Structure formats: C-alpha cells, structure tokens
Amino acid sequence: MVAFAREHLPRFDAILPVDVVVPCAHGSSLALMDDSGTLVLPFMDYEAEPPEEIARGYAAIEPAFGEVFAPTNPGALTLGLQLHWQETLFPEEFRRVRTIVPGGQYYAFALSGRAVTEVSALGAQTHLIDVRSNAYSSLTKARGWDRLFAPVVPAWSRLGPLKPEFRGANFRGEGQVVAGVHDSNANFLRYLASDRARFTLLSTGTWIIGFDTEADITGLDPARDTVSNTTVYGKPVASCRFMGGREFATVADGAPADAARFDVLDRLIARGTLALPSFTDSGGPLPGTGGKGRIEGPAAETPEERATLAALYCGLMTASSLEAIGARSDVIVDGPFSQNPVYLAALAAAVPELSVFASRVRNGTSTGAALLGLADAEGNIPRFRVELEPVSPAASPGFADYHRKWAALTRG
C-alpha cells in the first residue's frame, strides 16, 4: 500500500490536485514499530488461528465484556489477543517496540512521518479501550501496552504534508495527511451527515454489521454477537453482526446474487426448504449454531433456487441480529445487499414493525472518509442528503409461518 501511494499519488495529483489524503482501514491490524519507525513484526493476518496455548492464555486475561463490549473474536480479529500473541511468542522483537498504531494510522505515519492513534480504530471491538470512557482498558494498562500507543487525536486531525517521496517533482495539491478512520465507521459517518437523526445502518458485504443510533450498549449480549463500535466523535454505538456475505456465498454455492427471484421465493416457502444457521464458525445472533449450517426440506438445486434461498436466509439472519440489539428505528441497508431485491423484501417481511430502506449511496466508506478531509477543527462536517428507496415486504403466501418455523428450529 505504501509503495502504491508512492507511485500513484503524484499521478492522481496530475489529474486533479490532491489537497487531503485520508487513510481508512479495517479494525483488526496493528503496526508495532521500533524507535526508527520500522515495523518490528509484520501486520498479522486476522484470520490466523492462534495456537492453543495463546488462546488459553488470553482467555485468562481478557477484559470483562461490560468494559470493552466485545467478546474475543474468532482467529486474530481481536487486537488484544494479537498483542498477547506477539508479546508471548516473540519476546525479543516485542522488547524493541517503541510505538504502536492501528493499521490506518500506520499509513498516515508512513505518508506524513507523524505517529498517532484514533478512537474509532481503538473502539472497533479491540479490547484495548474501556468503551464508555474511551480510556485504555484494564488489560491494556496491566500489560503496559498503553505506554506504547501513539497519542490519540481526532480522526480529522491534520498531521502535516505528505513526505517528499510521495509528492513527486510537480505536485500541485496541498497534500495534507489526515489521521484517518476505521472503515465501517467511515461508512457510518456518511449517514450521520444525512438529514436523519435516528436510524439503524446495515453495512453489508463480507460482514453484515448493524449500527443503531438509539440502542443502549448496556443491553448488549456477547452470546448473540452484539458489540459496540465507537464513532469518530468518541460515542459508543450498539452494533450487531454476522458474516452475511460469506454465509450467502456458502448457501448460494456459486450462484450469483442476481439469480434470486420472487417466484422462486414463493416456491421455496411453499415447499418448506429452509437454510438453518450457521454456515460460518460464528453463530452471529443465534448462539451455539456456529458451523452447524444445514438445509432442511427439499434441496435447492438450481442456481436460482440457491441464490434465492441464500437471500432469504440472510434476510432472516439479519432480522435476528436487529432483534438482538432491540432496533427501533428505520433500517437502512447499505452496500451490496442493498441491490438484492429478494434479500430486502425478506428482511422487510421479517421485521414488520420497522421500515426498511435501500440506500442508493455508492462508495459510502470512501465518501465518509472524504468528509473527514472537509471537516473543520471541531469535526463539523458538511451535510448531505442520502437517497433512500422504501422496501416493500415480501408478499409470499405463508411467509410468516415459514419465519416462525425457521425461528423455532434455530432455537433447537
């Protein structure tokens, strides 16, 4: 990524002057640097499975859910576990660490030369902060990791200009580097900039992650994969999640999403073909179902049947996630699933008490990140309307009975 920026930022600037660069990255990476700013260890792959002794050791020291509002996630998704793993298995390298920054802020450092940390990255189910106070967590303090983290600054903070190596010979723009943001929070920021005060945003892709502006984080349940995220303004937001994109792909078994059809939905419901959770290791909102995904009833054999069943399944799983956080506001579906009419209609039918809308925003994450480049010193951002399309619930005969049967079977 750094090499890409070195090569292409001058090219972008030749097309249109680059005044601001806003790094944006997922929330499961850390950069551990020595006193020269060189990486002591490579970025970890968050899908790596920790050795048994590492997992067991971390379980003994992990902070309470009521402090960090996140369980220990599968693999190496949890940054607290990553640090424990690195500190335990690579003690000599870890002793050389002088500065730690989240992944997005590493790119800000590489571009500007200034090391900082940012709260939306620290609050992305990392176990590194006390979510309600935004202070470092008891774990982070007990291990002494807090002394290694770079200073926390707002996401919109200007760190300085691009280093000369990223500017080329004839750079025209100001080239200011901003601290940067957690990717899902960048997308959420795009909707915070809209004219809606209350909503539940479903950010869809590999994961389907819900952000609810009204839900109380004290009611979150780790067994149902309800967690908190932290906005760029330091506010905790109740969230729900499951690996919707990955589960869709498993159920669809190679069928494209656009093969889903409403007449096929009617047929699957009428004959009682059910996809039951879960088709990943995480059960999402339904505890104890991880890795137990199965099809009951007549098989979905054609691509149209598999794609439709996958859309229906993900709609019902999303409804379960919304129920788990007690969603009460309008639901806005963003991302790839907002373009799947069968998924949208199934979701709307499964949550009849809520209004569901499909967002027509494209590139919400990059747009939200760009808003940080337009923020003033206090973090005020421009306001933009979001184009939303109301979703009509699926009208398939027997949908309510099908949903009740599905829910009963998921409870065992």
Image (cartoon, helix red, strand yellow):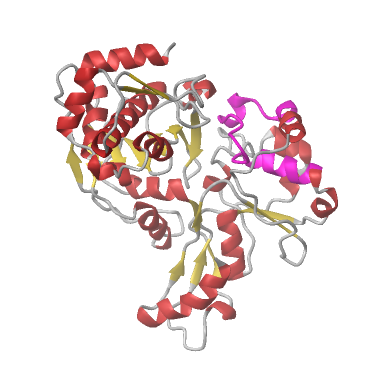
Q: Position of residue 190 (x, y in %)?
A: 35, 50
Residue that extends furthest to the right in the rendered view of this protein: 92
Q: Is residue 114 visible?
A: yes
Identify the residue shown where x is 14% and y is 25%.
395
For the residue pair 226 and 159, the one nearer the viewer reads as 226
State which quarter of the image contains the N terminus: bottom right
Q: Is residue 84 magenta?
A: yes
Q: Observer-nearest residue: 351 or 214? A: 351
**Residue 373, horizontal then vertical, whole percent:** 42, 62
- Is 351 on the left-hand or right-hand side of 187? left
Rendered location of residue 195, percent (x, y): 25, 44
367 above or below 250? below
Q: Is residue 211 above or below residue 376?
A: above
Which region of the structure is painted magenta? 59-88
User: As rendered, which of 118 and 281 lies closer to the eye?
Assistant: 281
Report whether residue 351 is seen. Answer: no
- Whether residue 330 appears in magenta in the rendering, the answer is no
Classify the position of the C terminus by image quarter. top left
* Relative height, residue 6 to residue 131 (above, below): below
- Give me the residue at 57% from left, 68% from top: 2
